[in-house]
Amino acid sequence: MRTETPPTIRLEEYRPSDHLIDSVDLDVRLAPRETRITAVFALRPNPAGEPGAPLVLDGDDLTLLALDLDGQTLPPDAYAASSFGLTLHRPPQRPFTLRIETQVDPTANTKLMGLYRSNGVYCTQCEADGFRRITYFLDRPDVMSVYTTRIEADRGEAPVLLGNGNPIETGEAGHGRHYAVWHDPHPKPAYLFALVGGRLDTVATRFTTMEGRAVEVAVSVEPGKGSRAGYALDAVIRSMRWDEAVFGRAYDLDVFNVVAVSDFNMGAMENKGLNIFNDKYVLASPETATDQDYANIETIIAHEYFHNWSGNRVTCRDWFQLCLKEGLTVFRDQEFSSDMRSRAVHRIGEVRTLRARQFPEDAGPLAHPVRPRAYAEINNFYTATVYEKGAEIVRMLRTLLGEAAFRTGMDRYYADNDGRAATVEDFLDAFARASGRDLTAFAQWYERPGTPRIAVEGRYDAAERTYALNFRQSLPGGGPPLVIPCALGLVGSSGTLAGAVCPQVRDGVFVLETASAAITFAEVPEAPVPSLFRGFSAPVRTEMSLSDAERLALLRHDADPFNRWQSAQSIGMRILVERAGARAPESDDAGPAAQDFAGALAAFLDTEALADPAFAALVLGLPGEGDVANEIGAEIDPDAIHRARQTLRRHLGRALASRLSGLRGDLADVPGAPFSPDAAAAGRRALRNAALDLIAAADPVVGADLARAQLDGATNMTDRLAALGVLSLIPGEAREAALAAFGERYADEPLVLDKWFAIQAAIPEEDTLERIARLRQHPAFSMTNPNRVRALIGSFGLTNPTQFARTDGAGFALLAETVEMLDRSNPQIAAKLLTTFGSWRMLEPARSSKAGEILARIRAIPGLSRDVADIAARTFAG
Ligand code: TRP
Ligand code: ZN
């Protein structure tokens, strides 16, 4: 056990490694409890390092079996070894070879970092610092090596053996064992190392790259699940084609493997040539996967594949640069998914995620810059800020430079940094040189935490036919202004006022670079409504006092679909915030604003719902309870928000009832038609189910009947789960019977049971805690499987605000107990769960004091992992 408190690592203290490792030869003999790894490293002093420095190799939970240098056993005083590191006091000042034998226990590895077993399948996870749990190493991303890996295992236990790069040899090893040798010609950091050994079913196909390389593409899954791997395989092929067409990037090995495992800490991992996935993001069939699952698979398959260039060919110098690969790769997967589906619908989804996850993070105690300056535990920085806000920065860069210069900049970035471990400065430099622009001020986006607020005022001068807009930006932490691209236009009584001109607006974008700025449009024939931050062109909060009538004009006429959706959201939000702030009781009278809103939605549905059902479903969706809480920002009462939302949903459901049931009929499936997971079919299901949800909010009796019928007749998981979700909110026998039947039907489908766990954890009722306690005893539940824990406990914290933040503290206590229990087995997951406390100080005093007590109790637990101790300390302090 380590006892000393771990040091904080700081960006400004970065120094190159004193040594380099040019090649790594591994011989891994897989066995359930005693896996032996022989590693041979070609080392040399780094010319950029300090001459004569000791060689300090990282280790974590290793047993050292043997060690020699250039074939010689080292005398005991030449080195110091523990399970957490290996130091050579006086390494040679010339190239030399180090041979290290270690032993690990993959079966006992519950952290799911390093080499572990998932349902009997051997697999690895090395990012960020898991390779040191396999052998001693310079485990930092700027040390890049060429790897050759021999994997040996019992043939019965592990007939499939996969590694990075290309397969070069296979053979018998005696005693029922066999081996495979893999060679990866591309130098890489240790975090991209991977191997897999197990019984797996494989589906495969061929892809020929634009450079003429024939690639064997394969997806391997648990035996018997091969029929659910086809969608993922197709998504790989579409990703390969897209990166060639859009970014000119081709794949660079002869094989590309994707493997799905059921125990995995995050979504997936981009190991070179061997992506390893959480099976939730690979397996899909109409019977088990929702439309959201299909969309997630498509996006995450693309994300990991795209890392081959943005992450692997060009990697990160150090972990402070994490956004260099993650923000950029999220941007790339967003663009891919937008091209595969509806761009507008996808953009709205991206922004909803950003607002639901990143905005609260940026407003709470865990706020940090997209490029953090210090960390105690890097695994706690795989955050919405690094990923999602990081992607928004790349998007703003494209908006500022324009499509063509952006693409030239990307090409330059790849050309200049291929095979290197790069920094954010290298990234921006490529764009500065490609465009001739000075990006120094823009670079501040990487450094400043917090969501900027942009206050805007508009004034129309009828005599002069001018419209003036005043912008003022303010950052939570103060400081110099940011460079903020605002895509905008003016909307009149019958659409965008195309004739209005403004010298500061180029290609529809005004760039706000100063603390405040005023711009004036000329040739404005009527009082306009401004459509600001079209497409959500910057990750900011906009404050402008528009009337509901003006917002409805945008919903009706704006050319920008994002702002059409936004205007409906803003009206809904204003009504909800007002009711919640007044602590209004749940009632049948939602007020006059809600009546006008319902009228506008009715008109919208009549003219547009059938033309774009996916978009219409989004317009009908009110801001979530979490969104309303974030908007209120202080003294939050989750019960008041819940009541406000119930009232408005009921009102809309009643006002729109006949239209909603009409739409359900119009959008019904043709009987016997085959299932398609594509965007158009998914959009029809989305609107049908949004309609069902509102109908049930207005009339639970009718809603329950419709939901039960849908549950019985459904031919796919999207419709079945939507019906179950509606029923889950209507207390009574019908709900309990439906839940029980669903649980039995999918008793052998863990990924489907996760949906069932999550639906029940979200029920906003007093006895949900008892329900969760019962479900924890369910045979399919397991504290060691991250998907199960996230489904039952994680989603409770994220989707059930009234019960999580109960005034008696019992909801907080449930999360805290789970964190404490998990901290011993899987600290990464424990720490992630604890982040649900992030907004505790914004709660009204009775609740926040309970949360504070419980956080203090967690902090006092002796022997906490670094992961949990770090989150607890920052959450409590903030
Ligand atoms: N780099 C992975 C991605 O594509 C995520 C990742 C980082 C990860 N660390 C991990 C996955 C640990 C699993 C476990 O975003
Ligand atoms: Zn990633």
Image (cartoon, grey):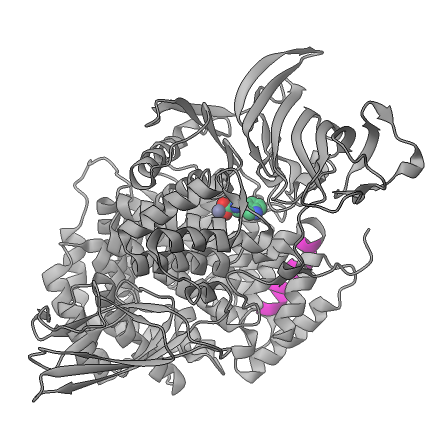
Quick one: quadrant of the C terminus? bottom right
The residue lying at 19 percent from left, 44 percent from top is 669
Please tell me whether residue 70 is drawn above or below residue 691 in the rendered image: above
Q: Position of residue 838 (x, y in %)?
A: 55, 69
Residue 746 in view (yes/no): no
User: Which is nearer the eye, 751 or 481?
Assistant: 481
Q: Which residues are magenta?
A: 811-823
Q: Main secondary structure of the magenta part?
A: helix
The residue lying at 64 percent from left, 73 percent from top is 876
Q: Please indicate whether residue 661 sits to the left or right of residue 446 in the image.
A: left
Q: Position of residue 431 (x, y in %)?
A: 39, 53
Residue 563 in view (yes/no): yes
User: Which is nearer the eye, 824 or 341?
Assistant: 341
User: Which is nearer the eye, 129 or 523?
Assistant: 523
Q: Please indicate whether residue 84 sits to the left or right of residue 578 in the image.
A: right
The residue lying at 82 percent from left, 22 percent from top is 71
Q: Position of residue 789 (x, y in %)?
A: 57, 52
Q: Please indicate whether residue 509 sits to the left or right of residue 120 in the image.
A: left
Please tell me whether residue 233 is drawn above or below residue 442 in the rendered image: above
